[in-house]
Amino acid sequence: MSEPDNIAQEQSQVQDSLHSTTSGTSRRSSLNSKGVSRRASLRRRSSGLFAAARASFVRSRGQSGANVDTLRGNTGADFEGYATVHRGDGNGAFAMFDLFSCFGKKKDGLYFLLIKGYHCFVFENDEGKSPKYAIELMNRKAVIQPSHESFIPKVPHPGAERNTTYTTINLETGLGDIEYKFTFANMEDGLASKFCDVVSAASNEAITEQVRKRLGHEGLLSKRASVRYANTIGAEKTRDQPEAPVGTGEVLAEMPVPGY
């Protein structure tokens, strides 16, 4: 082959290589563009779904628009499970009155718990249209109680047998006050421990967000639409929490003093 032919062949190979590289880059660029477009489309769709759910929540005054599936979102909840929920520490001479308030409103019972964002949502069951109430987890800690102090619920948990054991967890404030007691059936390995870990993570994340907002760094916050929605619903449903039971000291303080 003559030298001009060799040069022509080399130029042809270089052009083919450049064409192949350009085509590959174009294909990758096209795929990346489609991926970005698809993600943008999913975000718009997700935002639309949560906007509709929010409208339903407002119209129904909190009775719908925040069911379990909606709060799970596309990525699921951080924690789910049944537990017996008791308001307050349940100790003392007047603990017997904790089950019902003076108006007959039930305080204790078996509920379905779901943690998403910075709140623990308390549902009647896993098919509830909206949580009965929500518990804020910022500056809260979950503490597992010794087995001999665990509460044995009168209403058995779904799937529990006679020999099923239970674990009780205290939800405490930063000052150590007990706000709730949660009792889990020991049927799923590590369920109680997972609850404690998730509460700790939610509390820390909420504190971090509060600090960032205080410093004016809100632009650094990046949360999924489902988490933002859960935080919005949680902030409103915390108002529906049952009142904390009256303590022994408070009751005695209201009693008349003999001789007066």
Image: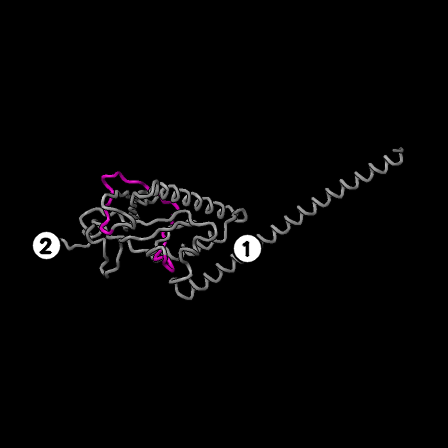
In screen coordinates, is 164 left or right of 35? Answer: left
Identify the residue at image location x=44%, y=44%: 205
Residue 256 picture location, percent across and down: 15, 55
Which-is-in-front pick, marks 2 and 1?
Answer: 1
Q: Is residue 48 left or right of residue 180?
A: right
- Residue 143 highlighted magenta (yes or no): yes
Which amino acid type is marked by label 2?
A: Gly
For the record, the magenta segment spans 127-155
At label 1, the amino acid type is Leu
Q: Estimate how packed mark 1 is, as few (under 14), some (14 to 19) or many (20 or more) residues with alpha carbons within 10 Å.
A: few
Q: Say which residue appears at 25% left-offset and 42% top-offset.
A: 150
Q: Residue at x 54, y 46 (%)?
A: 220
Task: Return the x and y of residue 55 as percentages of the image width and height.
Answer: 46, 64
Residue drawn 70% across the image and 47% down it: 26
Q: Is residue 174 visible?
A: no
Question: Which mark identifies residue 148?
Answer: none
x then y, percent, for residue 196: 36, 42
Q: Position of residue 175 (x, y in %)?
A: 32, 43
The residue pinned by badge 2 equals 259
What residue occupies the far front of the structure in this picture?
A: 1
Query: Considering only order in the chain, which callout, 1 or 2, is on the residue closer to the N terminus?
Result: 1
Screen quadrant of the C terminus = bottom left
Q: Nearer the viewer, residue 237 or 144?
A: 144
Query: From what the image shows, is residue 193 above or below residue 87?
Result: above
Q: CA distance from mark 2 to mark 1?
A: 73 Å
Identify the residue under disc 1. 42
